[in-house]
Image (cartoon, rainbow, N blue to C red):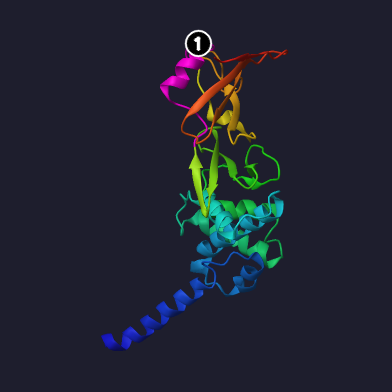
Amino acid sequence: MKKILLVPAVLFSTFFLAQKSEFSNNYSTTSLKEIQKKIPQNEKHEFYKQYFRALITEEMTSKFSYKNYSDVVLRKFADTIIAINRMEENSKESSEIIKNIDRNFSIDSANAIDNYHLLAANIGLYPDQMFPIVSSEPDEFTIFETIPGEILTYSQQSGVFTGLYFSSYKINGSNVDPINPYPNDNKFINKVSKYAKSGWRFQPRAGYGIEKNKLGEYIISTSLYTAEDSNAAPSMSIEYKTTDFKRFIPLRIAKNDDDVKWTVIK
């Protein structure tokens, strides 16, 4: 009896793997749409995650100004953004999301903005969390180029109250490596402390700008907060430079007055 039951089990396993292989590495939304109706309901969660990866990758290809990104780089960046998943695959909420995505596919609205948010919810988000959209310009809740062809960034809610954070990645060959634009070494802190009030801090939700000069140095600009500042109202701005996002040199600092006057940090 065990041998008789083994054959159907093997056949089912083979069928399951064949179905999954149809979409697991497929980054074409057109191709994925063509097989969507054939995907078993218990595979829809993973299928729509893959569709979302493909959609984000295609959006980056279309909207980013640099046109020579490799497929590997954009796919890795899309995978990185989607990496956080907290929703149970078979939860009641997940089933309802999949049902609504199915409906949008049936009315040819797979790439509509409301379906984008459903696809994002399918990967697992905190309640009321906004997933970033691909943009040609940097902004809150977007996926964008900080330095075209070199540094990519996305901003997203942290899931804690109104927390917002920005995450940047540097392209190194076929790798997409995270970078930290905020210095934390004592030498930098001691220099800045001579020009800023004690208790100053960086605030992740403030965001930052990164530019590259002719010497190959990255010039970073961001807000600086004192102990009295609220998270939404920084009283100072700062610029500093780096070549490797490990060692930073402060350049200048200013109070955020109507008439901004920069002071060179020596």
- Spot occupied by residue 80 in the image (x, y as percentages of width and height): 51, 50
Q: Could you say where residue 22 lies in the image, as x and y percent from the top left? A: 54, 73
Q: Quadrant of the N terminus?
A: bottom left
182 in magenta: yes
Could you tell me the amino acid type at mark 1? Lys
> Which residue is identified by label 1?
194
Which residues fall within the magenta stretch? 180-199
Query: SS of the residue at dot 1?
Result: loop
In the image shown, does 165 or 116 lie closer to the viewer? 165
Seen from the viewer's position, the closer of residues 189 and 172 is 172
> Could you tell me residue 95's position as x and y percent?
52, 59
Splitting the image into 4 quarters, where does residue 213 fall?
Answer: top right
Q: Look at 65% across and 45% down and name the residue there.
A: 148
How many labels were placed on the picture? 1
Residue 143 vs 192, above or below: the answer is below
Q: Tell me if residue 130 can be seen.
A: no
Answer with left or right where residue 217 lies relative to residue 136.
Answer: left
